[in-house]
Structure formats: structure tokens, C-alpha cells
Amino acid sequence: MLIRILLLCSVLVGAAAFAEQDQSAAQLRKHLDAMTTLEGKFSQSLFDEKGEKLEESQGSFALQRPGKFYWKTEAPFPQLLVSNNKTIWLYDPDLETVNERPFTDDLQQTPALLLSEDVDKLRKNFTVTYKAGDKNTHRYTLVPKVTDGLFQQLILVFAGNELKEFHIQDSLGQLSQFTLSQVKRNQSIDSSLFEFTPPPGVEILRN
């Protein structure tokens, strides 16, 4: 933080900083508001705090505002995360367990909910900064104002209006990089995709 020698200077610097953050948050909101639904494929790379790659995975996803998402990891370890805006299910077929908990609008616990939040909530929960890149790319960095959630930093990268990748640095310093492909935006998605019925015989764990 800048040392405030003169009151006038501190007011001007503070106002400029807030204006920049508000502008970045509003600009990000425009990108997010342009997406009512999003679906496609993803690849994920996980790195430890030293930058060493720990694992890679692939899968498919679908998101729909507000608060509905389907995130299926297909390889190497299958897992399914589903939300219907009321309940969140995490199904692990290898362990034959389903973790079931009430839906929460805590953005730090469920970053996918950024798709459904307005700019005021973004400003309230995050410090948002913007950086333009090459080839019409837009990079937004979101740092939680309260640091007791699941992640320390979230980066969203758009090519034009299309979300192409995002990076999540968790509370342990690990970095997950997601690259999206075969993306379809604002197309109809069958609502049954956001419902989940546990298979017979699996253990259901309720939080």
C-alpha cells in the first residue's frame, strides 16, 4: 500500500484505485453476462507450489445461469460434480460414494458461480484486475478479499468474448490450469443434465 504523506494525494490515489477496480469488475461482468449457458470439453493440468506438474485430466462440462453446472472428469480418475441450484452432488465411481450438500452461493467454495453473479457481488467479494493480451485476449485476475476459502487467486482468460481458459491457485499453493475446447455458448441444454440420482448401492454422505 502506498504511504499517504498528504491527505489530498491519498484521496486521489484511493479514488483512482477504486475506479480501476470498478471498471475491471464491470468489464468482466459484461463478458460473463454474454454467457447464459456454456458447454464443451476441458483439459486440466495440476502443478504443485514449486511448479512441478502433478497430474493431467480431461473431461466435459456444462454451465447454466444461475447456479447450475455439470463437471465430469473422465480420465485418469473419473468423477462427477453436479448442481441444480439447490443441491450439489460429488460422485466418485471408484470409491462408490456420493457427497451431497445444500447449494451455496459462496463464490470461494464454488468458483463456477461467477457465471451467475452481478458486478456488485464481484466487487464485494474480490479485487478484480484486468490485463489485455495479444490477439484480442482479455485476462482478469480475481483475488478474494477474505482469504479463508478454497482458492487464493482465480484467473479468467477470454479470446474475444469466448472463455478459453482459467487458472485456480488453491490455499496450498497448487495451481490448476484449465483449457476449454469445442465450446458452445448460449445453446439450449437439457435440464436433466443438472439433476443427479445416485446409482444403487453407493454410499451417500450428506453434509
Image (cartoon, rainbow, N blue to C red):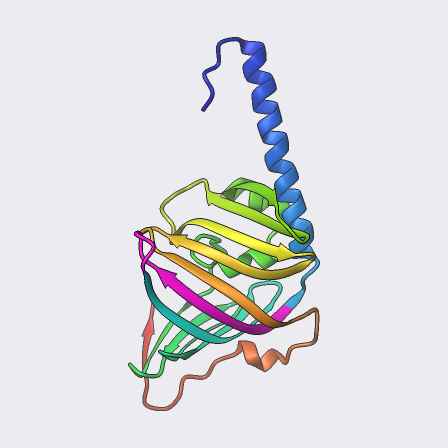
In the image, is residue 50 part of the stretch drawn in magenta?
yes
- Give the residue at x 67% y 54%: 135
Say if 57 sits above or below 24 in the image. Answer: below
Most extreme residue toward the bottom, as rendered?
200
Q: Position of residue 50 (x, y in %)?
A: 30, 52
- Magenta span: 38-52
Most extreme residue toward the top, as rendered?
6
Q: Position of residue 18 (x, y in %)?
A: 59, 30
Which quadrant of the figure has residue 91?
bottom left
- Give the residue at x 34% y 54%: 51
In the image, is residue 145 part of the stretch drawn in magenta?
no
**Image quarter of the C terminus:** bottom left
- Give the residue at x 45% y 60%: 177
Q: How many badges with numbers are in the image?
A: 0
Q: Position of residue 122 (x, y in %)?
A: 57, 45
**Image quarter of the N terminus:** top left
Decide if residue 85 is in sight here.
no
Task: Report the front residue among 183 and 150.
Answer: 183
Say if 87 sits above or below 169 in the image. Answer: below
- Give the residue at x 47% y 54%: 106
**As drawn, is 166 to the left or to the right of 76?**
right
Most extreme residue toward the front, as rendered?
134
Decide if residue 169 is in sight here.
yes
Task: Report the front residue among 206 and 112.
Answer: 112
Task: Report the front residue among 195 and 37.
Answer: 37
Say if 203 sits above or below 22 in the image. Answer: below
Say if 204 sits above or below 133 in the image. Answer: below
**As drawn, is 154 to the left or to the right of 54?**
right
Which quadrant of the figure has residue 184?
bottom right
Q: Give the prevailing secondary structure in the magenta stretch.
A: strand
Q: Where is residue 116 in the image (x, y as percent from the top left)?
A: 60, 58
